[in-house]
Amino acid sequence: MFKPLIRLFAFYGKEFNEVRRQPRLVLSLILGPFLILLLFGLGYKGTPPPLRVALVIPESEMSDPRVERVKQIIQDKFVLVSTTSNEQEANQLLDQGRVDVVEVFPDQIEEKVTNGQQVWVAFRYDKINPIDEQWLQYTGYVEVNALNQALLMQTAGEMQDQAAETNIMLSVARQQLDRLNENSTEQDRAQTRETIDELQDVVAILVANPATAEKVLGPDTDPAELQKLSENLQALDQALATGNIEDQKQQIQETRDQIDRMEKITHTLSSTPSQALVQPLMLDYQNVRGKSLDLVNFYAPGVLALILQHIAVTLGALSLIREKLLGALEMFGVAPTSMTQVLMGKISAYTVFIGIIALLLVLLLVFALHVPFLGDRVSFAVTLILFILASISVGLMLSTLSNSDTQAVQLSMIVLLVSIFFSGFFLPLEQFHPFARWIGYTLPVTHGMQSFINIMLLGKSPTLFNWIWLAGIFAFTMIFTMIAWGRQFRRLR
Amino acid sequence: MAEQSNIVEMNQTTLRFADNVGVFDLNVYVPKGTIFGLIGPSGCGKTTTVRLMLGLYKPDSGTIRVMGRDPRHFSHTLRERIGYMPQHFALYPNLTVIENVRFVASLYGMNPLTRGRRLREVLNFVELADAKHRLASKLSGGMQRRLELAGGLVHNPVLLFADEPTAGVDPVLRGKFWEQFRILRDQGHSLVITTQYVGEAAYCDYVGVMRQGRILAIDTPESLRKRAMGGEIISMVVQPQDVLPATQALIHQPLVKSVYHRPTHGKPGLLQIYVDEASEALPVVFNYMHTEHPEINILTTEEYTPPWDDIFIELMQEAEAGSV
């Protein structure tokens, strides 16, 4: 009655004794992954090195004091290696690998902008790494944004100065109009007329040049209203000249209202900080989890999953091959034991063994590297067992495809490589085409890693999707292994 | 051999591999409680035959019965009564002697709580009790073979298959192995043992001589010897000048089948006299020569047992001549 159990535990004890006889292996299995993580944490900076730039400024612009400001802005993101007006010289630096990018400014930037043209700043580079290229393009984008912002700030400042001047003039005009009545003295009327003449000149310019009007009165300026004001000012000027103010009372009031509105607009324009005009919207970042994790903490669950899978796959792949090469399968074939007992005995031993390694690694991660463990320990244990079972069974399946130790190890390494690329460890799964995502789904590490991140870092439960996939991988690979090895078991031919 | 008493029976069993190698038309009967030796050169099909008997190979034709059952359908209970010592070391180098033996004991379902005595017995039997905590990888070749034997015997099987247990083992240890096999036989076990060493045929109760996948002969060692040599041999040494008259005299003796002069360096007058039964014929022939031909000076007369190498070569040559 207990014989099947005795046989199962025979493999359990055998595997365990064999592993414990190799203390260096055990030590490397536990300390190796921990040291990898530690070195990764200590060695990885997380930010790309600053890009070196050669700046090309046209000879005619070299003496412009604004070039220094441009250089300052560039040096926020780049290391400025050279400033030259010789583009060929800059290109040579790029060829020689002494700079990462050549940044070429065209001539007559201000004129072109004033004439409503866009000006192109050329970034030349020779990167073949797409990530480097993306980083360079992003940095260039940020730099040109900063330059644009500086230009806008300058323009806004000029506009505010003009608006302030106009505002004063409008204010004077309004006050004089308020004082104008039938009792006004000749002197008052003369002063008012003088002011209205000045105002007429300004309004005439604004009517003739809508762009300037927008600069002074803002983008919502109505040209028809300016035209009406111009006409009213002209009529008022004539009335003051003839002294016939009484008949123009209504027009005076209308003009006064128009001036009042324009005064308010110019006041708002001149009193608003230029920063608010140029950058009316700002970003406010808020991470509801407090703050993001450092890279070691973020990658720890992924590395844990990757390493555990590799150990399990390798042990599984080598296990049956070694039995076969040793000739033990022949012995099992004669003994009163079944293929299922052989496999289950091995799987249970490896599961306990890898489980102990996982436990020690998690303790090291949490207490030595301070990786958070926010989730439920039971969920973690269930996930871990499913993950280890699935990984071992993948290894056992590989053993059916191998004829030697070397082949088994090679196949394990291929699984490791596929895992690094397709599990979402470095590149998010969502960035793959759907067909390629399925490759990731067939790997235990994909689900192990997602579940470990959920449990350890987010404090969430693992998803049913991950559990079902892990169970599915285990079931499929075990069936495959049973069929493949079953053909050899008790049947050497 | 009565059929009921055979623990192994193979009838017209054939298994063909690629290139027309394999075993062909095997008829083997192993009586219970005997040592059956399967002897032949490397690659002649001994291991294949054993694997067929164990159900590891399926025959292309013919039938096999081991303990009354087709080996392909052995029950677990029946498997527990069979021991197997494979040709190559199939135990675990990283386990100690006792751990290896325990592992095999567990494979055979032996209760860990009650098997201790049996483990000690078997380690004593193979003389590995003092080395039980030594790693298998640290054992000598001979000790590894003994450990394998312990693995094959730990569950006290009724029938033991040992595939070339003495291969690569020194002559003294080989002698010990056979001594242990005979003890097992005497305890009632049946043994099927393969070997390349033809001299070991002498230790067997029955011997099957194999060559190129076929059984050339199968019988007791003595019968095989007679069959190969055409009878038994009496060795007679006379003075060199008496060789011819002695030969002429001997061929007229009714029990003598033939006489050959086989001079050696120290015995120029050595004659080999072929008879049916050497033990019966020796006194008769001696008296005949003494009384009928007293002029011939006989120096020595004795039964001669030819080495198994010679017997084996004879059988091979007969097979090649197509007469076996």
Image (cartoon, coloured by chain):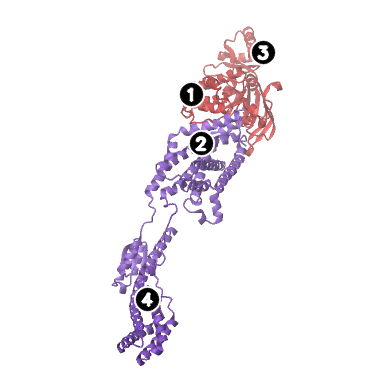
Q: Horizontal and vertical percent for residue B201?
A: 59, 22
Q: Are marks 3 and 2 in contact (CB under 8 Å)?
A: no
Subunit bearing disc 1 = B
B256 left or right of A315 in image = right
Colour that chain B carries in the picture: red
Colour that chain A carries in the picture: purple
Given the image, on which type of amino acid does mark 3 rest?
A: Gln
Q: Are marks 1 and 4 in contact (CB under 8 Å)?
A: no
Q: What is the CA distance from the residue labelled 3 to the residue labelled 2?
A: 83 Å
Of labels 1 and 4, the one closer to you:
4
Mark sitting earlier along the chain (1/3): 1
Given the image, on which type of amino acid does mark 1 rest?
A: Lys
Residue at the right extreme, as displayed: B3
Mark number displayed over residue B253: 3
Q: Which residue is under mark 2?
A: A352
Q: Which residue is under mark 1?
A: B132
Q: Nearer the viewer, residue B254 or A436?
A: A436
